């Protein structure tokens, strides 16, 4: 098996190294990741400038672009390998509910699915993980099984793993996305030269986190696996919009 690995925390992230080490035990690994932290980059592609690639001593390739750029380049074969699967992570911090809209980790996996490859995004439940090895083992188990699963086209598996020892994981739940409350107000600050700057505030707290959601599974110590469908069409709303348009024009 040929495995393309990327992330949004950057090419130096410990989660990336842990994931690459674990997956190297089951296949040929190519790591192509942003040259710096690109958390929150979502599905953006860099179209206003050319991209540069730098191969590090450990073989990892750093790209001065987004996670989506990395998978787009890495899957093309220009770095000597055409992958069978894309795995993104291990993210430092969960990607739950509405997080997936902004997540570069999830976006890297989505780019793989756009290119007709099976794709997995994997995140730790802790922003300062102590058990990357647990998430890496879960990733390996999923990669070993995913080619046998009947995953619908354009579907990404979004996995969140509690930050605890592997043997202490409660099990696995297949979940739906929960929802968050609105984020806090942006934070205004003045730099040393007196110029006003703004920090985007962190994600809002969980607003819908009951049984069946990814929030709930992670909180209870279970690995959460949420199938994400890239098609964003709200089919149930098409008739309402059509009726409105017909009555308005």
Image (spheres, rainbow, N blue to C red):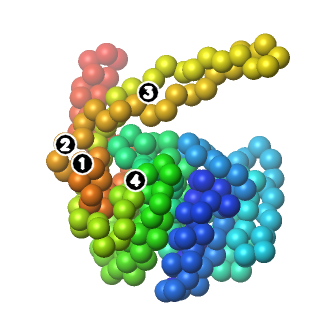
Residue 174 locus on image (x, y percent): 24, 60
Secondary structure under tag 3 reads loop
Cα–Cα gap, marks 2 and 3:
20 Å
Say whether residue 2 is visible.
no
Which of marks 4 and 3 precedes in the sequence? 4
Instruction: Say which residue label 2 marks.
Output: 210
Residue 241 locus on image (x, y percent): 29, 28
Callout in the foreground (2, 4) = 4
The C terminus is located in which quarter?
top left
Instruction: Say which residue label 1 marks.
Output: 216
Which of marks 3 and 2 precedes in the sequence? 3
Q: Is residue 184 left or right of residue 180?
A: right
Cα–Cα gap, marks 3 and 4:
19 Å
Few, some or many residues within 10 Å of mark 4 (<14, 14–19, 20+): many
Which of marks 3 and 1 precedes in the sequence? 3
Cα–Cα gap, marks 1 and 4:
12 Å
Residue 121 locus on image (x, y percent): 45, 61
Cα–Cα gap, marks 1 and 3:
20 Å
Q: Nearer the viewer, residue 70 or 24?
A: 24
Secondary structure under tag 2 reads loop
Instruction: Say which residue label 4 marks.
Output: 125
């Amino acid at each position: 098996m040929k495995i393309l690995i990327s992330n949004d925390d950057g090419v130096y992230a410990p989660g990336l190294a842990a994931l690459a080490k674990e997956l190297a035990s089951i296949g040929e690994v190519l790591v192509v990741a942003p040259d710096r932290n690109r958390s929150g980059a979502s599905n953006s592609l860099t179209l206003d400038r050319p991209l540069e690639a730098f191969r590090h001593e450990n073989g990892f390739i750093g790209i001065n672009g987004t996670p989506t750029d990395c998978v787009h380049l890495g899957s093309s074969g220009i770095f000597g390998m055409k992958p069978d699967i894309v795995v993104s992570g291990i993210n430092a911090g969960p990607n739950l509910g509405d997080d997936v809209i902004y997540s570069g980790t999830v976006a890297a996996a989505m780019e793989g699915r756009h290119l007709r490859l099976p794709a997995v995004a994997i995140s730790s439940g802790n922003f300062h993980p102590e058990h990357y090895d647990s998430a890496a083992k879960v990733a390996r188990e999923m990669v070993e099984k995913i080619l046998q699963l009947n995953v619908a086209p354009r579907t990404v598996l979004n996995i969140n793993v509690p930050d605890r020892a592997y043997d202490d994981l409660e099990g696995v739940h297949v979940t739906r996305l929960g929802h968050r409350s609105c984020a806090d107000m942006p934070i205004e600050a003045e730099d040393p030269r007196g110029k006003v700057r703004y920090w985007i505030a962190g994600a809002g707290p969980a607003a819908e986190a009951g049984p069946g959601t990814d929030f709930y599974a992670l909180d209870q110590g279970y690995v959460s696996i949420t199938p994400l469908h890239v098609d964003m069409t709200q089919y149930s709303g098409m008739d309402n919009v059509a009726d409105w348009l017909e009555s308005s024009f």
